[in-house]
Image: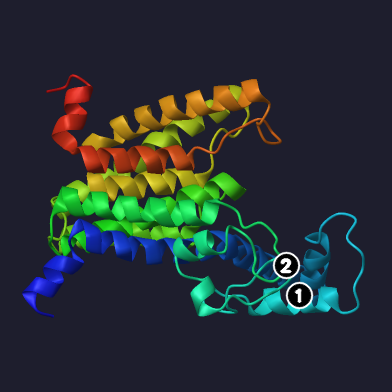
Amino acid sequence: MPDGALTLLLSPIGLALIGLCIGSFLNVVVHRLPIMLERNWRAESAELLGLDAAASTDAAASASAPAGAPARAGSDAAAASEQANLSLWSPGSRCPQCGHVLRWYENIPLLSWLVLRARCSACKTPISARYPLVEAGCAVLFAAIGVRVGAQPAALLWCGFAAALLVLALIDWDTTLLPDNINQPLLWAGLIAAALGWTPLPLSAALWGAVAGYLSLFLVTWFYKLATGKVGMGNGDFKLLAALGAWLGATMILPIVLGASVLGAIIGIAMKISGNLREGRYVPFGPFLAGAGLVCLMAGQDRVMGWLGWY
């Protein structure tokens, strides 16, 4: 690729356009990955218990149907078949209400939602504003990384880091899950990038950042369980903070935890006052860890340390 074309691709505008497309794919991941994980867990459980995996999948499809929905001949079988074959790549995007398969021009990031006036072209069911917001948010993140890093290949690496944090935050908010399928590759990618010199951290700093990230939350949760007999946090949060440490270093762990705690407390109090707390009366911590990690990335270590009065 000519230098001029590469510079344009890695410019904030070029990265923003890439971010729109990646954001569209992230919407697919956020919706489908939890379904795929649950399908695999059901299959593994059925195998361990000596049950019929197909029957377990049929039961899951029936349970996922809307309450009070009329029975339709073959509907459960069709839903079970679709779940069995579901992947991040197929089947193509479709309306969840009527099953209309989106044409290519109905699947253009952001633009199609505006042209369709936020409604399915077939059944006119409203399309959630979250889809274009995720696409636009990803575009803004990628453009900001372009400004922060400059027009160099490392910008693509940090865009991948930001995209992983965005999808983890959304999945955790929806399901209270932080999938190992994303957490673990993110951690290893940070360590490998440091080993290859693609990030400013030496490998030793990235390794100790991962250790500090994991142990900090693990020890807090362990002591909390000893004191109260309750589990205060899931293992996914430990792994996410370990990944953040591998990318950003041990010195950023405390600012990330502090920022996530403050933001989580504010959002949690606001949800409690408004009566929007989910069952169990808790707010997942992963989205705030991811958000604080992105803020620390954009601000840089010197500025973050200055905020804390350490410089």
Q: Secondary structure at mark 1?
A: helix
Q: Which disc number belongs to residue 53?
A: none
**Distance between mark 2 and mark 1 Cα atoms:** 23 Å
Q: Amino acid at mark 1?
A: Ala
Q: Is residue 193 visible?
A: yes
Q: State whether residue 213 is above or below residue 143.
A: above
Among numbered discs 2 and 1, the one appearing first in the sequence: 1
Q: Which residue is mark 2?
A: 123
Q: Amino acid at mark 2?
A: Cys
Tell me the quarter of the image containing the N terminus: bottom left
Q: Does 17 sit left or right of 78 as displayed?
A: left
Q: Position of residue 151 (x, y in %)?
A: 13, 60
Assess disc 1: are there few (<14), some (14-19) or many (≥20) residues with their C-alpha within 10 Å of its C-alpha.
Answer: many
Q: Name the residue located 21 percent from the left edge and 37 percent from the top edge.
A: 299
Q: Does 69 sit left or right of 99 as displayed?
A: right
Q: Which residue is mark 1?
A: 80
Q: Position of residue 163 (x, y in %)?
A: 37, 57
Tell me the quarter of the image containing the C terminus: top left
Q: Position of residue 19 (x, y in %)?
A: 34, 61
**Snapshot quadrant of residue 14:** bottom left
